[in-house]
Image (spheres, helix red, strand yellow):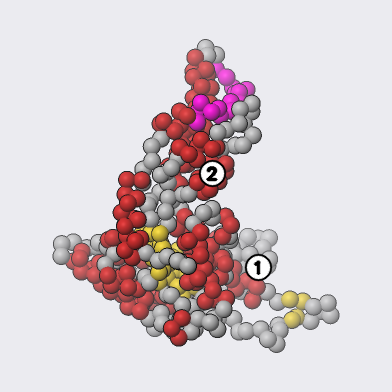
Amino acid sequence: MAFLFGRKRLPEPQDDQAADAAVSNGTVTSNGNHSVKNSSDMAIYEQYQKQNTNQVLSNGLVANGSDSRPQRPLLPAFETAEMRALGESLSRDIVRGSPDVKWESIKGLENAKRLLKEAVVMPIKYPKYFTGLLSPWKGILLFGPPGTERYTMLAKAVATECKTTFFNISASSVVSKWRGDSEKLIKVLFDLARHHAPSTIFLDEIDAIISQRGGEGNSEHEASRRLKTELLIQMDGLTRSDELVFVLAATNLPWELDAAMLRRLEKRILVPLPEPEARRAMFEALLPGDNGEEALPYDTLVERSDGYSGSDIRLVCKEAAMQPLRRLMRDLENSLEAVPDHELPKVGPITPDDIETALKNTRPSAHLHVHRYEKFNADYGSQILE
């Protein structure tokens, strides 16, 4: 028995807002100011907002534009109502507009950024050159130690630079407990991506997606195998140059992927632990620069945090910020009188001694397996050697 996802119920329009017509499939409703009333639907609707807005010229005529292209429906023509329901669910929960992440906001990772520009950005900007043997790479793998959000940042930067529709996929998005629905969701996902091309499908923790278990007993392996097979089939279908759909997969366990999946993920890019430049940028962003009488020792932080992941650095900063608060809380607890909220004293500044204490209390979590990522990169990774 297949499980059908129910539609989300749209909120009723307010008395002071006029409800305009719904677009295409009737799931997205806007008010008179062309703003979407259901925030979950805003992601799909925003890319069509400009197309739906009629411009009024100075002479009072409505400019439809003779060169304007007909509006695409939000969903392709699915074969069955069940597939359409799955498509509506994915569209509401996954399709995003421009993530608005610039390359400059990602410190370091020069090799990774250059490879991504070469594999995705340049083929979209200059399609004339990427034909025949130089047809675009369709599958890209980002791998490296855990504890960093830079996989997602890189994927969002690609989508922003290329102005592609961004599909942010996790295991919960495409894995269903109902037999056969996971494979259908994968197929619907790629149909949506082709329909909204150019598109970027970001498969976060792909090892979890293709090894996700469902059912009981021997059916667990069978369900995982069917899901993986459908994903491979859909990735094999991304062969036409006019279907600009790119699959970016990320994993902390690249050695868990088999040869069949690695063949589809032609570009394999190492995302290492933060470099000194990136670590300094994180410390300066998380810890205030204007910190009273003593300047914070950023150079010491950068030197002592070698091997720390992004989450480790955040924990160091949090631990440093807790030190002055602990001193204040100790004084308040020792006080015999209760202090009203509006009379509570301010938390004191972070000192270099607080930084030292934070570094002693916080240890790196991802450095032990760095050598495994380096070996995988040496065996299978992509480089630019000139």
Query: Is 16 covered by the magenta stretch?
Result: no
Secondary structure mainly formed by the magenta segment: loop
Mark with earlier residue (2, 1): 1
Identify which residue is drawn at 25% across, 61% down: 213
Q: Which element is circle 2 on?
A: helix
Which of the 4 image quadrants contains residue 307?
top left
Identify which residue is drawn at 55% across, 46% down: 281
Q: Position of residue 374 (x, y in %)?
A: 35, 56
Q: Position of residue 27 (x, y in %)?
A: 52, 71
Query: Is 354 covered by the magenta stretch?
Result: yes
Which residue is labeled 2 in the image?
Answer: 280
Residue 278 in view, yes or no: yes
Q: Amino acid at mark 2?
A: Arg
Any mark on residue 304, and which?
none
Q: Nearer the viewer, residue 146 or 95?
A: 146
Which residue is labeled 1 in the image?
Answer: 34
The residue mark sitting in front, 2 or 1, is 2
Which of the 4 image quadrants contains residue 39?
bottom right
Q: Amino acid at mark 1?
A: His
**Residue count near mark 1 (Cα–Cα under 10 Å), binned few <14, some 14–19, many ≥20:** some
Identify which residue is drawn at 54% across, 44% down: 280
Q: Say whether residue 244 is left or right of residue 254.
A: right
Q: Position of residue 227 (x, y in %)?
A: 29, 70
Give the residues drawn in magenta, as a range.
338-355
From the viewer's perspective, is residue 274 above or below residue 220?
above
